[in-house]
Amino acid sequence: MQLGVFSLTDRTGSITLTERVRDIIDFGAHADTVGLDVFGVGEHHTSRFAVSSPAVVLAAIAARSSSITLTSAVSVVSVLDPVRLHQDFAQLDLVSGGRAEITAERSAYAEPFEIFGVPVADYDAVFEEELQLLLALRRGGGVTWAGRYRARLNDAQIIPQLDRELPIRLGVGGTPESAARAGRLGLPMTLALLGGSPARAVPLVDLYRQNAADNGHASTELDVATVSHFYVGSTPQEARDTFYPHYRRYFAEGRGAHLDRASFDEMAAPNGPLVVGSAEEVTEKILRQHTLLTIDRFLGQVDIGGLPRDTVTASIDRFAEDVAPVLRRENAN
């Protein structure tokens, strides 16, 4: 099982843009230093977030790391030119020595569609078409393609050309249609477990694998990752007491909702969606996800809600030193 962390780059609190981006780059470099497998950076187009171009920030992390996979979390394919997106991540792949990866998804926000002039009414059709072009681009060579929403390509030689196919995953927020699409295309699926019990995701993973089989994709092609809100504390009580005020603020500023302590504690309970607790509790939660869903990768959103820089770094350290060895040992058995 691959283990990693990611930042959606939210700007909860008064931190400046310069400070926020600096911290994200430092978190990525630190995750590499302590031996984690993956670091992700989100893409957003509203003032609540610090990064609109993950490839740029990931390139800065690439310069300070040696082995960690660098993924978007996610790339909003619905509003981006697939040619430019592929070029950016192919360039990142060269800069990083073959460590770039795209996680593609539709936007959960309306703003990008207005900014980039994409018709919201055609939300899903645009995503499907641009994803198909992105997959054609990664095969390399001359690309001939025609669609409804973008100018056609005639034997276009898109540079840089790589010696491998750029890894592309599909991000799935929880809709059956998205899980089925990932399976139909035989692409790795990254599933957000942000609400309710992880057991609720079992039908989605089953649907993913069934659609893959129905479309002739071997089980060896498949890969399921889960992502969760995340914090590894020194003790169960410290973890909850530290994380709760930041998570409450994240809810208030991001969703306009109040999160009371009782509801938070229920979310942090053994069967809840929050992967928050001591190293032992976090280990058990991820093992539970693995038992339920047979996951190949786990990523924790490590810096949510304005958690202080030192607190985030300490959580990464506990994850790498106390959680990861147990998960890797259990996964090897």
Image: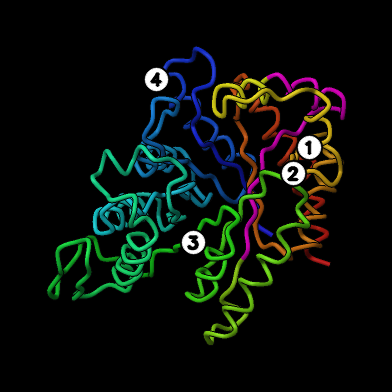
Q: Residues within 10 Å of mark 4 (few under 14, many from 20)?
A: few
Q: Which residue is mark 3?
A: 169
- Is tag 3's residue or tag 4's residue first in the polypeptide sequence? 4
Give SS at disc 1. helix
Q: Quadrant location of the C terminus? A: bottom right
Color style of the picture: rainbow
Q: Label 1 to label 4, Cα distance in Å?
A: 33 Å
Q: Which residue is mark 4?
A: 18
Q: Are marks 2 and 3 in contact (CB under 8 Å)?
A: no
Give SS at disc 4. helix
Give SS at disc 3. strand
Q: Is residue 325 magenta?
A: no
Q: Residues within 10 Å of mark 1 (few under 14, many from 20)?
A: some
Circle nearer the viewer, 1 or 4: 1
Range of residues picked out in magenta: 224-245
Tell me the kind of residue under disc 2.
Pro
Horizontal side of residue 189 vs 161, given as left or right: right
Q: Which residue is depicted at the point 66% across and 65% down?
A: 204
Tell me the kind of residue under disc 3.
Arg
Q: Are marks 2 and 1 in contact (CB under 8 Å)?
A: yes
